[in-house]
Image: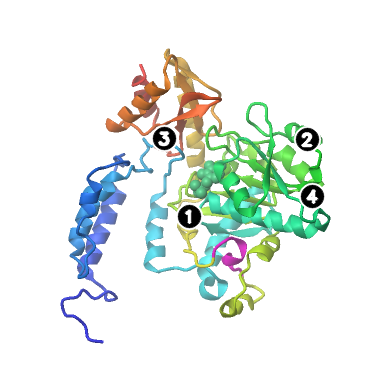
Amino acid sequence: MSEDPQRRPMFTFDPAMTELIFDYCRARLEEYPVVLDFGGVDPQLEEALDGLLTREGREPSEILDRFTNQIAKAVISVDSPRFLSFIPAAPTKAALLFDMIVSASSLNGTSWLEAAGAIAAENQVLHFLSNAAGLPQSAGGCFVSGGSIGNLSALVVARDRARRNSPELGSQRLRFAVSEEAHSSIASALHVIDVDAFIVPTDDHRMTLATLQTALEADQHPETIVAVVATGGTTNAGIVDDLEGIGSFARERGLWFHVDAAYGGAGMLSTKRGELFQGLRHVDSFIVDPHKWLFAPFDCAALLYRNPEEAAKTHTQHASYLDIIHSDTGEWNPTDYAIHLTRRARGLAIWFSLCVYGIDAYVEAIDQAIIIAEDAAAAITATAHTELVREPGLSVVLFRRIGWSDEDYATWSTDLLKDQVAFVTPTKWEGETVARFAFLHPETSPEMVSEILATMA
Ligand SMILES: *Cc1c(COP(=O)(O)O)cnc(C)c1O
């Protein structure tokens, strides 16, 4: 192959480009406090990208320059302690750094044959999480890209097991019991697996044993309801369903019990809210997103099964070229437990970070989000023009500015970001537009909260 001498070699170490990228990473890791920046509709973006993609390639410094000054500027920093919308992120420095190793080493965590070392380290974290949940030693699973794919992967296993174990149901449609507060990804998963939602009405937005039993008793064909999906911390309000009551009932009845704890699952480690998660010991499957309240970089969700062999029945991919990965009895192939084959060893970032800082530091950081939520609730109550909509659930606080219209909230939210004070977006609660704080970053301070509340005067 003749090489164009003008062309930059693609697979040879390039010291100058390496310095450029490492310098960027170093500066971003050093940024303190992290600047919020702006996302959204920037009319300059097309211009920023114009002319970058060419046949001949361009200088890395030119591309990086556009990235630094225009492209990255049009992204809100989720890891700013002033980011209080949706679910924020607060990756630890150790986790961010180690994720660079995962990238630089091109770690593919598909099979034991290829990557036993990486998978064993990831499993150390998965076992820590499943022990904390109270599952037996035989529990296991894998890391996937997010809660949505985790929920989908678990629920298709639940469906397949029901079809296997209940042949008498024939071609009848299956239903899974869910509360109306379930995350949108549950509806999406049920749609994909062609199962209907059996909506359990709740009093005060929390599914309990009583609400589930009442709903089942009123139904004509409860035998077609084969699974219960509970939420371990609703995204909108932080409400944890009655996991103990629902879970023990589901197990007694032989219903698959799945808990979506994508956001709230870290609460099981909290010294303040741990008891709300004791019912996790009953699950057949659950998910928790380390990229949320377990301080890992995107994208990382942990998916765990009580009996991983049930999951393997659904998820193991069979292909001539893959047979060899299924030949060793001691193997653990993450591909067998979710809808994926090739996967980044994304669990290594949290593995390194947990090992470096230790479990106690995590517990403290998780508790801190609950403390700031409690402080904020007190400040809201003490401020004349604001009031709580309800007591905070985990680290989410819903509150109202007395007398405000939908438009007032929208304008206020836009101005807060414009002034770089905070990113706080309104939500709906029982049909009413209200303000919402989602705390997560341990460095969000009471002063920041006061500063935000003052803007509502
Ligand atoms: C965030 C969240 C999800 C979705 O997780 P992704 O990682 O965004 O796919 C699902 N369920 C709950 C309760 C969540 O908070």
Work out how far the residue at label 3 is from the one at label 2, CA to CA, in angstroms.
Answer: 36 Å
The numbered mark, 1 or 3, whose residue comes first in the sequence reads 3
Horizontal and vertical percent for residue 299?
46, 54
Work out how far the residue at label 2 is from the one at label 4, CA to CA, in angstroms.
Answer: 14 Å
Q: Secondary structure at mark 3?
A: loop
Q: Residues within 10 Å of mark 3 (few under 14, many from 20)?
A: many
Residue occupying the far front of the picture: 171
For this rendering, which residue is in front, 148 or 455? 148
Could you say which disc has been placed on residue 254 in the image?
4
Q: How many marks?
A: 4
Work out how far the residue at label 3 is from the one at label 4, CA to CA, in angstroms.
Answer: 40 Å
Disc 4: residue Cβ within 8 A of ligand 1's nearest atom: no
Work out how far the residue at label 2 is from the one at label 1, CA to CA, in angstroms.
Answer: 39 Å
Which residue corresponds to mark 1? Answer: 350
Which residue corresponds to mark 3? Answer: 84
Q: Residues within 10 Å of mark 4 (few under 14, many from 20)?
A: few
In this view, the mark in front (2 or 1): 2
Q: Is residue 55 above or below residue 284?
A: below
**Kind of residue at badge 3:** Leu
**Kind of residue at badge 4:** Gly
Which residue corresponds to mark 2? Answer: 213
The numbered mark, 2 or 4, whose residue comes first in the sequence reads 2
Q: Is residue 6 above or below residue 155?
A: below
Of the 4 image quadrants, the one containing the C terminus is top left
